[in-house]
Amino acid sequence: MNPQIWKAVGRWLLAVVACMVSLVVAFIALMVTVILIPQICIRWGDAIRLRMPLGVEMALADLVTFSVGIAIWTIPTVFTIGFALRMPVASRWRWAFTVWVLFLAAYAWLTSHLANTVAPHPFAIGSAAVLVAGVALSFLHRRRSRWHSLGNIVALALLTMPCWLAFAFSPPEPPTARQVWSATLQETAGPDMNTQSEFGARRQAVFVGDRLLVVFDAGSAGYEGNQPMSKYHLLSLDIKMGLIKNSKEFTGHWGAIPTLYATDDGHAIMADGSLNSFNADLTPAPAHFTADRGRVNQMSPDGTTMAWETFPGTTLLDSHTLESIGKHLEESVPTSVSPEGVVTNNAYWYGQYPKEHTFVTLTDEHGQRLIYHSADDCGGPPEFLTREKVLTIGCSKIRVVSIQGRILRETPSYDASGTFAGVSQNGKRFALQYVSERGDPQVLLYDRFVIYDTESLMPVSMVRISDLPERISWSAFSADGHFFVAGKPAKLGLYELP
């Protein structure tokens, strides 16, 4: 057989091998960089103070991640095909770029990330059309390389245009809160249990007078019988300097981390099987309560009332005396409590509204009544902001509803994934937490808090967590809403709000 035929066959076999090998390498690279590249992009953006909305930032990071994986596959494949076709090296680069941008256009069309910013479909179509036009013109004109290269560059610019337009027309980001101090409460990395959930993260730190009280899992304490135990630390810190003034250590069941609640009379309540009241310096206060059934894990925003879920129903407790007050309520699983009643999204009114999904039900001594309903299927649990105002979050919207059922104010959320992160006792400010996790096991990409004014629903400040927790950062407001604490035992920060 002619040696030239063997060389041609060898060239095409090389192309096939390059395509297969580079495809495997690209897949592995995507698995590795799907977390790494977004983390790097977010850190660089914070370092250079690039104040870009989270949706836009993540869209660009995902585009960069996908582009790296596609480049690992397309460049060796196209290069070896060009080698088999005996194309010049410069031409191979142009065609590799063309195929790379074409795959990015397909990604922009199919993915939902860019659609969260500006509709990407017209730009994806335009990019593909420009690529075809550039290639066609390169065959019709003498200066093929110029038209081909120009088409590649314009097509890539069109693909990133939705992100830049969203960045240009997005509202300004709220000012960053000033950090007053940061404190290390635990030198070594603590257990994941300290930041296991958004619900628990709001109950590990509270402001009591001029002190900040925190409780956390400090590590294993061995076993008692077959029961694993943990060491728990309860600390009282000075707000001005973040210095530890008082501390207590005790042992409890593993996974049953105590929770803290601040009353409106300068006391704290710790729930650890029973309720115990104590002062800011951790000395005991008289109030004590042990439930014979059910649980107590809710405090009203003003610090006056707790909800004892008695299954069935709920009993309200006075936070000063921990004695029951008012009439027994019908609702068994409230999401938030006020001195007059409780709210929940666990009661469904499909009989009256069969096509709707989100319901906010108020239960007081007069019974249950529906105060808000919508067709949204992504609503979060409702939360009292004051006695008269209830916050609902969902489908990229923030709404404040009166207990009479009237929508007082509505505004777009800073980002689609916000969860409630606390409210000040005076009801003037509340916080939403924005986090993003990826991977298996889940890895945190960013953790940010946006502080909102209750009356206007305008964002007034932002807290960026640089030292990311295992899952979710703690959060707490001072009673007047002037200070905000966030972080984890390894690094807890106090921030002054505007």
Image: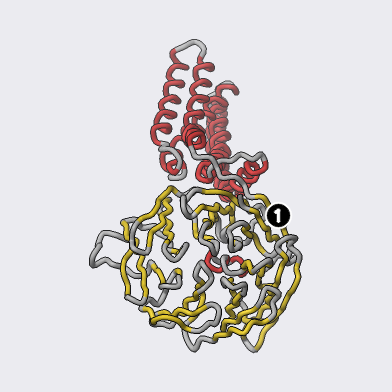
Relative image position of residue 65 (x, y in whole percent): 56, 43
Where is mark 1, residue-wise? Answer: 180
Q: How is the image coloured?
A: secondary structure
In the rendered image of this protein, does residue 134 appear above or below residue 471? above
Identity of the residue drawn at 33% across and 61% down: 405
Relative image position of residue 356 (x, y in whole percent): 29, 59
Question: Left or right of 336: which side holds 463?
Answer: right
Identity of the residue drawn at 55% across and 59% down: 440
Relative image position of residue 46 (x, y in whole percent): 64, 44
In the rendered image of this protein, does residue 311 appear above or below residue 122? below
Q: Residue furthest front?
A: 265
Q: Is residue 134 visible?
A: yes
Identity of the residue drawn at 34% across and 61% down: 358
Identity of the residue drawn at 47% across and 62% down: 385
Element at label 1: strand
Question: Left or right of 483: which side holds 317?
Answer: left
Relative image position of residue 123 (x, y in whole percent): 42, 32
Q: In this view of the protein, which residue sits in the foreground, 67 or 170?
A: 170
Q: Amino acid at mark 1?
A: Val
In the rendered image of this protein, does residue 142 appear above or below residue 61? above
Q: Quadrant of residue 214?
A: bottom right
Q: Residue furthest top?
A: 142
Q: In this view of the protein, which residue sits in the foreground, 29 or 232?
A: 232
How busy is the neighbourhood of tag 1: few (under 14 within 10 Å), some, or many (20 plus)?
some
Q: Is residue 475 visible?
A: no
Q: In this view of the protein, which residue sits in the foreground, 138 or 271?
A: 271
Q: Quadrant of residue 180?
A: bottom right
Q: In this view of the protein, which residue sits in the foreground, 307 or 65?
A: 307
Question: Left or right of 361: which side holds 438?
Answer: right
